[in-house]
Image: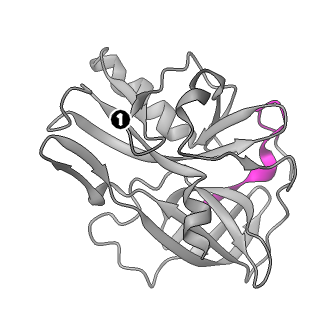
Amino acid sequence: MIEPEVRQFCGPIFFTHSLQSALGNVIANGSFGLVNTGRKKLLVTNFHVWDGFQTARLDAPNLQMCICLDRNNPVVFAPDKPIGEDRDLDIATFDMEPLLPACSGRAFYPLNQNPARRVSKGDVVFFIGFPGHLRRVVDGALGFGRSPFGLRVCSVDGLEFHADVSNISTRGDKFKGISGCPCFLVREGRPILLVGFARSVWTNYLRFTHARCLNPDGTIMKLK
């Protein structure tokens, strides 16, 4: 099955006023992917997730950004700055070296062994997001529901590609919170391949940034 394999490379990222109690303290969440470039082990998410955290912290200096790496408690994710960031491509990368001991419940996709290949119209992609409408607080504990998606690429534009989601109900902000989740090319009888990261819905299209933009050192290149 595809889902268990994909699940190990992704997780939820969230902003909270306190890790002592989730009730009323979590203000937003997104998703992240874990990637091994051969030179760096990276957490990758959208630029707008990182930028949103910086903006929110202006009014709430004690706000924390946290990530869920296994079934244990979330860990505080407090990088000084990204290794690489690009507002136009809506992507940001962070060095995970300080948190590697907490990553036993996750895996880093070996991008160095399986370089991201181009996608074409008609390709099927699969990803798991953590939409905010599935976030729950039960007995003071925070839980994230995950939502799998299988979509077909409808267009490609340089380092961006798109999938038509007009036939998917958006009730309950179905896509809000999936920002940054890794997306995999699915081909019958072949291993899954990381090809991009989900961004946002624009009109009836879900946008993705292609994983080819990641340099081995974690910086971002702008290939066309």
Q: Amino acid at mark 1?
A: Asn
Point 42% across, 29% down: residue: 75
Q: Position of residue 84 (x, y in %)?
A: 70, 30
Tally of numbered discs: 1
Check disc 1 and report the residue beneath it: 73
Check the image and report above or below for 64 versus 191.
above
Q: Quadrant of the N terminus?
A: bottom right
Give the residue furthest to the left. Answer: 139
Point 18% across, 31% down: residue: 21
Confirm whether the magenta stretch covers residue 74: no
Taking the image as shown, residue 103 lies to the left or right of residue 224, namely left
Mark 1: few, some, or many residues within 10 Å (few <14, many ≥20)?
A: few
Q: Position of residue 121 (x, y in %)?
A: 75, 79
Q: Position of residue 111 (x, y in %)?
A: 80, 49
Residue 157 versus residue 191: which sits nearer the camera?
191
Residue 160 versus residue 29: which sits nearer the camera?
29
Q: Which residues are magenta?
A: 208-221
Taking the image as shown, residue 105 lies to the left or right of residue 172, namely right
